[in-house]
Amino acid sequence: MRYTNFLVLLACGSIGVWPAQAQDALPGPVATALRAAGVPVSNVAVVVQQVGSDRPSLKHQPNTAMNPASTMKLVTTYAALEILGPAYRWKTEAAIDGALSDGLLQGNLVLRGTGDPKLNLEAFWMLLRALRGKGLRDIRGDLMLDRSHFAPVQGEPGRFDGDPFRPYNVLPDALLLNFKSLRFTFAPANGGVRLAVDPRPPALEVINVLKLAEGACPDGRAFRDLIKASFDSAKPRAIFTGQYPASCGEKDLNVALLEPNEYAAGVMRQLWAELGGTWTGGVREGRISPGAQPFHVHESAPLGEIVRDMNKFSNNVMARQIFLAVGAERSGAPADGAKSSAAIKAWLAQSGIAASELVMENGSGLSREERVSAATLTAVLQAAWGSNVMPEFIASMPITAVDGTMRRRLRGEGVSGNAHIKTGLLSDARSMAGYVLDRRGRRYAVVMFVNHPNAGATQPAHDALLRWVYQAGR
C-alpha cells in the first residue's frame, strides 16, 4: 500500500483508529438498536475508555447518576478485595456451653456466624462432621445461633418484587445457611411426576398432585405458574397441583420457604442424624457466653474465589453479605448498610475517586435506590486494572459467549471470549460494565446504563456497543 493511500484510509477510519477527541454521539448501530427498543438516548449513559488512558474514547452523559442494577456489584467487589483482601475468609465458630463427657453434651451447642456468603449444605455438613470427629455425639440442649455480627435487617424479603420465596430476595444474615433455600427436584417417572426435596426438614409438608403432560417446557415464572406452585411459610407447606411437561425432563426449583431458625433446625436435625448424632433440644438465638468453650472453627473459601461465584451468576445474597462484611471490617460489628456504604465511599475518596453521586443501599444492585454514574464506574474499572487485586477482580466477571450471564451472548463473533462483562437487569434498568480486548490487542473499560421502562429490550444495543469496541470504533 502506498503511503498516500494509507493516509486516506486512516482519515476514513476504515482500519479502526479511535478519534483523538472523545466521541459524544453514540455509534450508529447502538443508536439504531435503542430506537428499535423505543428508548431515547437521554435515558442512556455510556463511557468507553482505554485502560490506562486519562480520557474516554466515547462518552455520553458520563456524569449522570443512574440505577446501575447488578453492575453495582463491581464497586462492592473491588472495595472488598482491597479492604478485606483476596485471601479473606469468614469464620463460623462452634462453642460448647455446658459439660461434654464421653460424647454427651449436657448443655447448648452455640454457632456464631460472621456472614459467610457460602455456608451452603456441603460447608455445613463439613462443620457438623468436624464436630462429630472431635467426639460430640449426643446434644442434650439447644442449638443457639449467634447472629450478632450483623445488625438485624429490616424489611420484608418480597419488598422488591413481591415474591418473598425467591432465593435472591433472602435478607442478609450473619449465620446464613444455604441461602435458606430448599431445592425441589421434579422428574417424569412411571407415568407420573417424582418429587424430591433437599434438604428435607422434618416439619415440611409437601403435597404433590402434579400430572404429567405434553407440550414445551417453560422457564422461570412461567414454569412455576404451570406447576401451580404455592407456598405457606406458616405451616410450612409446599403444594404442586398443575401440569408437568414430560419434555422438561429433570428440573429444579429453589425456594426460600422457611424462617431462618426453622430452616437451621430442620437442616441440623437431618444432617446430624445422618452423621449418627442425636439431638433433643430446640433452636433459639443467643450469644456465646463468657463461659462457653471454643470447640471448632469452620473457615469459608477465600474472598477471591467467592467473588467469582457472586459475579459470574450475579448472586445478590452473596453481594449483600460481602457488602456488610466490609462495613464490619472498617467500622466494627454489628454491621449495617449505612456503615458499609460510608466505609466504601470513604475508601473510594482515599483512592482518588470522588463518587459524590454514589448511593449504595445494599451493594448488590437489587435496589430502586442505588445510583452511580458511568464516569465513576469507569474510574473504578481503571483503578482496579492497576491494582494488585486485578487478577481476582477481572476473573470474577462473565466472559462473552463462555460463562456466567454472558455465556449465550455474542457466540461466534469476534468479541466472543474477548470481553469480561458484568451485566445487570431490573424491570426498568439494563446495564453492563467491564473490559473489552479489541481486535488490535488494546483493552478498554466499557460502561453502559439504560434506565427506561423499555430497558429490558435493549440487549441488542449493549451487544452492538461491545461489537463496536471490539472492532476498534469502526
Image (cartoon, helix red, strand yellow):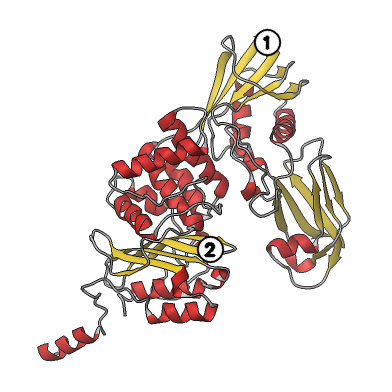
Confirm whether residue 43 shows in the render. yes
- Numbered label tally: 2
Q: Quadrant for residue 61, please give it.
A: bottom left
Residue occupied by mark 1: 102
Q: Quadrant for residue 436, please give it.
A: bottom left
Work out whether residue 8 or residue 183 is closer to the camera in this orientation and state it: 8
Q: Is residue 262 left or right of residue 173?
A: right
Work out whether residue 219 or residue 296 is closer to the camera in this orientation and state it: 219
Q: In this view, does 407 lie to the left or right of 88?
A: right
How crowded pointer 2 is (Cα within 10 Å; few <14, some 14-19, many 20+) is rated as many
Instruction: Give the distance between the C-alpha atoms of the residues marked 1 and 2, in whole angstroms.
Output: 59 Å
Q: In this view, does 287 lie to the left or right of 263?
A: left
Residue drawn at the location 49% of the way across and 27% of the way down: 333
Q: What residue type is labelled 2?
A: Ala
Q: Which amino acid does label 1 sit on?
A: Asp
Q: Which residue lies furthest to the left in this view?
A: 3
- Residue 44 percent across, percent down from the top left: 44, 69
- Can you say whether 234 is above or below 226 in the image? above
Work out whether residue 195 or residue 468 is closer to the camera in this orientation and state it: 468
Residue occupied by mark 2: 429
Label 1: element kind: loop
- Residue 295 percent across, percent down from the top left: 57, 18
Q: Which quarter of the rendered picture does the N terminus lie within?
A: bottom left
Q: Earlier along the polypeptide chain: callout 1 or callout 2?
A: 1
